[in-house]
């Protein structure tokens, strides 16, 4: 289950006394710090996913996690609100009876405002600063959630990993960033179901996680991505003088109780590598 979900569970019901409430606050701070550190550094998800996958094994294509200046300022602003709210709550506990303060309407309002701050910062830590899509940290957390759901419901889960051909070799950072942002906007229109989840999976790679989706449905989504991104007005970065093309790897699987997501990711990524090694505009199923 994602860290964001854990925060929600912790803050859903105020504690009955001041000791429990302060313990809840400590738990929220712990989740906040874990998410913030995960944003600023490469997040270790091996235990959560059940092993390593190609990008973690040293292929030199780690997911972008850095904050830009605007994001840092936004994060500090939310952190300040969080500190202000906690300070008010602590003051109320110190100046009044614990039993009265913990049930006071103003105190409970402050408690829920603090919970909102935590959820805001947790969501913030899962967003890619360039594209506005989920980052790799958010993807890994969502995958665990959907994997557990698919295991319980015995339903198919599909993973589509893809990139624009030639983008990896493009050395013009401004040009690459412009293309990544444009592709992200196209993807948000290409993925139709609200249950589907898009992320910037790696430096030049995207991923679409499709719950309750068999091979036919995954094929439709992959083809839509290939066509719609291919129809974008993108400069010829592949150096072939033709239209934009996309390499896409797809894996569809119904997980069992004894399985973990690492092999699921590996299979999709290996299919993607085969597509990328082909002559562009390829869709490969694992």
Image: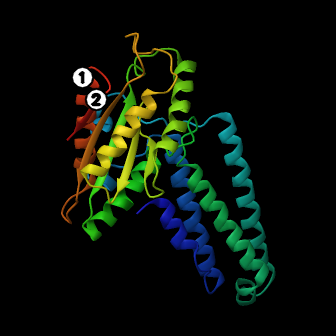
Q: Percent x, y for residue 70?
A: 69, 37
Mark 1: few/some/many CA within 10 Å (<14, 14-19, 20+)? few
What label does residue 282 carry, if any?
2
What kind of colouring is applied to the model shown? rainbow
Q: Percent x, y for residue 175?
A: 55, 19
Secondary structure of the residue carrying numbered label 1:
loop
Q: Residue 239's quadrant in the figure?
A: top left
Q: Is residue 220 above or below residue 130?
A: below
Q: Is residue 266 above or below residue 244?
A: below
Q: Percent x, y for residue 157?
A: 29, 56
Q: Which sits in the foreground, 104 or 8?
A: 8
Q: Tell me: 74 left or right of 182.
A: right
Residue visible at 27% across and 53% down?
261
Q: Percent x, y for residue 44?
A: 38, 47
What label does residue 278 carry, if any?
1
Q: Tell me: 254 left or right of 4.
A: left
Q: Tell me: 150 left or right of 11.
A: left
Position of the N terminus by quadrant: bottom left
Q: CA distance from mark 1 to mark 2?
A: 7 Å
Residue visible at 44% across and 51% down?
197
Position of the C terminus by quadrant: top left
Secondary structure of the residue carrying numbered label 2:
loop
Q: Is residue 36 above or below residue 6?
A: above
């Amino acid at each position: 289950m994602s860290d964001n979900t854990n925060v929600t569970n912790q803050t859903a019901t105020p504690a009955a006394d001041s000791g429990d409430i302060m313990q809840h606050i400590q738990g929220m701070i712990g989740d906040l710090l874990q998410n913030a550190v995960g944003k600023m550094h490469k997040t270790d998800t091996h235990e959560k996913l059940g092993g390593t996958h190609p990008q973690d094994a040293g292929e030199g294509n780690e997911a972008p996690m850095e904050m830009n200046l605007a994001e840092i300022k936004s994060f500090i602003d939310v952190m300040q609100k969080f500190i202000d709210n906690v300070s008010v709550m602590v003051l109320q506990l110190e100046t009044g009876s614990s039993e009265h303060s913990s049930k006071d309407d103003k105190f409970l309002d402050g408690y829920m405002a603090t919970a909102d701050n935590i959820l805001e910062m947790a969501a913030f830590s899962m967003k890619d600063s360039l594209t506005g899509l989920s980052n790799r940290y958010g993807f890994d957390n969502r995958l665990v959630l959907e994997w557990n759901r698919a295991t319980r419901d015995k339903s198919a889960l599909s993973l589509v990993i893809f990139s624009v051909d030639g983008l990896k070799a493009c050395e013009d950072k401004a040009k690459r960033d412009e293309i990544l942002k444009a592709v992200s906007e196209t993807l948000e229109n290409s993925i139709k179901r609200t249950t589907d989840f898009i992320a910037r999976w790696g430096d030049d790679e995207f991923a679409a996680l499709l719950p309750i989706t068999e091979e036919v449905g995954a094929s439709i989504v992959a083809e839509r991505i290939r066509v719609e991104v291919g129809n974008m007005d993108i400069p010829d970065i592949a150096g072939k003088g033709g239209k934009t093309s996309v390499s896409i790897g797809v894996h569809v699987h119904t997980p069992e109780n004894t399985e973990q997501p690492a092999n699921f990711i590996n299979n999709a990524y290996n299919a993607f590598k085969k597509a990328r090694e082909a002559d562009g505009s390829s869709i490969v199923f694992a």
